[in-house]
Image: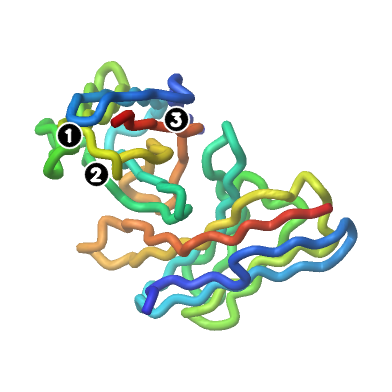
Amino acid sequence: AQTVTQSQPEMSVQEAETVTLSCTYDTSESDYYLFWYKQPPSRQMILVIRQEAYKQQNATENRFSVNFQKAAKSFSLKISDSQLGDAAMYFCAYRRASGSRLTFGEGTQLTVNP
Amino acid sequence: DADVTQTPRNRITKTGKRIMLECSQTKGHDRMYWYRQDPGLGLRLIYYSFDVKDINKGEISDGYSVSRQAQAKFSLSLESAIPNQTALYFCATSDSGPRSHNEQFFGPGTRLTVL
């Protein structure tokens, strides 16, 4: 069975600085997707970024980028120029390419200090 | 209007009561899911449905049942609620089409408290 682990229950960052959230996963599959979701206090789950395992290039969405290390089964999220609105719970998630079920990590609560 | 809606948004109930959480979507997606979120555990899959006639158990289906009344509606029932079912519940949808990446879209969540 696939597992996803986020070893940082809480992180904090100063406004305008950069923070990296860690995620590791375990799978025997070679083709899969990895995701980062953001959950602000409104509870809404918002997709931040998606990485396809067969693509070597790291995904980037504006201030959000990932460091995808397939051999190490690591998938970290870097937030640059952190803003107060980035404060949220962040979840890492995995899905087999041929499936649709998501497996989530435990979450990392990010605080952004002014 | 929101593409995925959940009712109620918040509910407090007592042990032993039957509760139904409802999910509706206007995205035209064929696949629907129910998750529960607990602190420190992330989101875990309860049930999922690939179409009206296809219902599947997820990781933690015990104590829950579902009904896919139509492509756009997927309900989650707690036949006899217990306190450890207190959680945040999410409905999600996805499209099985070739260009969709099967991306899941989430509803706003239902906060359920069982006393």
Kindly state the secondary structure of the residue where label 3 is placed. strand
Which residue type carries mark 1? Ser
Expressed as whole percent of the image width and height from the top left, the position of residue A113 reads: 32, 29
**Disc sitting over residue A4 in the figure:** 3
As displayed, is residue B88 above or below residue A80?
below
Whether tag 1 and tag 2 are in contact, CB under 8 A, the answer is yes
As displayed, is residue A83 above or below residue B107?
above
Relative to the observer, which residue lies in front, B87 or A28?
A: B87
Label 2 neighbour load within 10 Å: few <14, some 14-19, many 20+: some
Q: Earlier in the sequence, mark 1 or mark 2?
A: 2
Expressed as whole percent of the image width and height from the top left, the position of residue A40 reads: 41, 47
Instruction: Please tell me which residue is depicted at 35% across the width and 76% down the height of the picture.
Output: B27
Instruction: Give the chain letter at badge 2.
Output: A
What is the CA distance from the residue labelled 3 to the residue labelled 2?
A: 16 Å
Which residue type carries mark 3? Val
Whether tag 3 and tag 1 are in contact, CB under 8 A, the answer is no
Write down the residue under mark 1.
A65
Write down the residue under mark 2.
A49
As displayed, is residue A28 above or below residue B30?
above
Expressed as whole percent of the image width and height from the top left, the position of residue B58 reads: 59, 50
Instruction: Please tell me which residue is depicted at 33% across the width and 32% down the height of the picture.
Output: A112
**Disc sitting over residue A41 in the figure:** none
Kindly give the residue lying farthest to the bottom in the view shown. B70
Relative to the observer, which residue lies in front, A58 or A96?
A: A58
Q: Earlier in the sequence, mark 3 or mark 2?
A: 3
What is the CA distance from the residue labelled 3 to the residue labelled 1?
A: 19 Å
Instruction: Give the chain letter at badge 3.
Output: A
